[in-house]
Amino acid sequence: MSLVAVQNLSCTQGVKPLFDSISFAIAPGDKIALIGVNGCGKSTLLSELRESVDTANPAIILKQGLKVTYLSQVPVFDPADSILDHLFGSDTAVARAIREYELCLDRMRTDTSDELSRQFESAMAQMELLDAWTYESRVTSILNELHIHQLTQLMGTLSGGMLKKIELARLFFEDTDLIIMDEPTNHLDIETIDWLETTLKRMNVALLMVTHDRYFLDKVCTHIFEIDQQSLFAYRGDYATFLEQRAQRYSIQEKAEDSIKSVLRVELEWLKRGPKARSTKQKARKDRIAEMMDRKVFSKDNVLELGVATRRLGNKILALKDISKSFQGRSVLDHFSYEFKHGEKIGILGPNGAGKTTLLNVIAQRISPDSGEVDCGINTVFGYFEQNSDFFDPDQTIYEHVKEVGDQITLHDGTQLSAAKLLARFLFPSSSLSTAIGKLSGGERRRLHLVCMLLGNPNFLLFDEPTNDLDVVTLSVLESFLINFQGCVVIISHDRYFMDRVVDHLLIFNGDGTTSHFWGGYTDYADTLAEIAKAQTRSSEPIALPLLPIVKKKQLSFKEQQELKRLEAEIEALEAEKVELAALFSSGEGSSVAYQAAGKRLKDIEFDLQDRLPRWEVLAEMA
């Protein structure tokens, strides 16, 4: 018997339909990932299922006595509560007893008074009376596994990662039949994500979750539900299998749509001849034509390629020289030095609070180091994709905000794209531009943040947890864009799939202000650590992590320096001419002769650029 059966469930948000008459079932033991583009209704569907436990919904049938636990995307808490108060906030006798017992344990670390000893004995007696030891043992085990120890800390002082850990702890305290989770890996470090994977695989419960983490999805889930075209499509298997099956579905739908269009052309020609609908057969034929014309036209939800132009980096990009930074006496950067090179893509790993975001803020010159020098090239332009998108004015419309950032963007082929057209490429159609930002989903705000960042045509990109709240479709396109991006990229992320695809070496924060470099992606790093751990068991000597080799750069000769300057000037002139010619095509004011000449010249420019760019890249790398 199914735990949950959904039949013909529909939902709209304002005038925007999210999903229409969707049906599915969740059986015991099913582990399902729910995916789809941001704003399609994923979180809304989870909320509908959760609310149906307390408020009957005729479209949602639950097994009698079903126990459901829910992890929301954004934790709700009282900042003045302690961790202990939050974890055991329910007013049941067991919760009160455990809260008192844990509080006494925490106080006994520093207080050895007789009064506290008597309170502790009383708390133990109450635990015995209520038979709460089994529950407390599970609670203690989970808290230890998640490294949650200082239970008197106030919730308002905790990092996003610690808040998510506490919500996970609460989730696993109680017995349940169905776990519903909305973006469970957001803000979690990789160690905690590994723990969560292991825990969910071990548990014999049903799971429905929204996630963008494709490695996490593959390791935990057996099914994928996709919301697409206001419908729900179910797939069995991993993420790669889903991509193959979806491609097949799109192919079938496209062929069916082409067939309908062919029939419709013939039928419309028949209508143009003006047949009289006297017979039942003719009237039925007209009704079929009307039905085909009113059909829901198939179109793939798609974010087009991010083919934006990149400002050319100069010889000097950015050098961090002997940087140190501390907060409240705790060092997060200890004499850190690094000189960034053309085209490199660095991933940053490390525990929460180790200083990863601090480094990005120092690079972007948002904060100053306590000591050391930030030497930034004159042509370096930063684009900063922050961890949160809380800076938006919720009352401002999408279009109003984007117009403040910029009117247009230059694409890789030199053409100009207006802000409205760029928004359309990011699934913000013209009909949505008057929508207040406060009404957007978390993922839609992240997508808008990405649009605004790209409008500045940056050549040095900084990403702080870019995968939080972005859907897998947008992530896939962002990954492809970053792989081909010619400037510098620095990424803080706990998304292992994203890091494997994009970065070429890692900067690891050790937690004490020191850092290490490793050549390769996340999987290479994890495999190396595993091999070291194995080797360490067979050796009495400590084995060090292989670090990024330091290669002494070859210096440019005077002749090569002059060649580099000449190539840079020639490339800049060619690209400027390319933009002017593209503007001629966009204006629509040229003659056919002018268009023909411009087209020929554009081909020549492309040939000249292809001839010069490889040599420029070699010299720029050496500079």
Image (cartoon, rainbow, N blue to C red):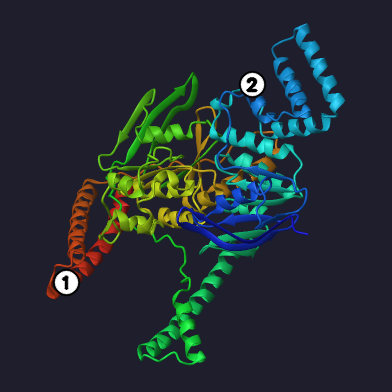
In the depicted structure, whether residue 608 falls above or below residue 54: below
Camera-nearest residue between 440 and 119: 440
Q: In what element is the residue under mark 2?
A: loop
Residue at image coords 51%, 91%: 281
Q: Amino acid at mark 1?
A: Tyr
Q: In what element is the residue under mark 1?
A: helix
The N terminus is located in which quarter? Answer: bottom right
Return the mark for residue 530.
none
Query: Is 531 placed left or right of 320 in the picture?
Result: right
The mark lying in front, picked from 2 and 1, is 2
Camera-nearest residue between 202 and 394: 394
Residue 433: where, in percent of width, then height?
A: 35, 53
Camera-nearest residue between 439 and 305: 439
Residue topped by disc 2 = 152
Mark 2 or 1, nearer chain start: 2
Q: Amino acid at mark 2?
A: Thr
Residue topped by disc 1 = 595
Residue at image coords 78%, 7%: 114
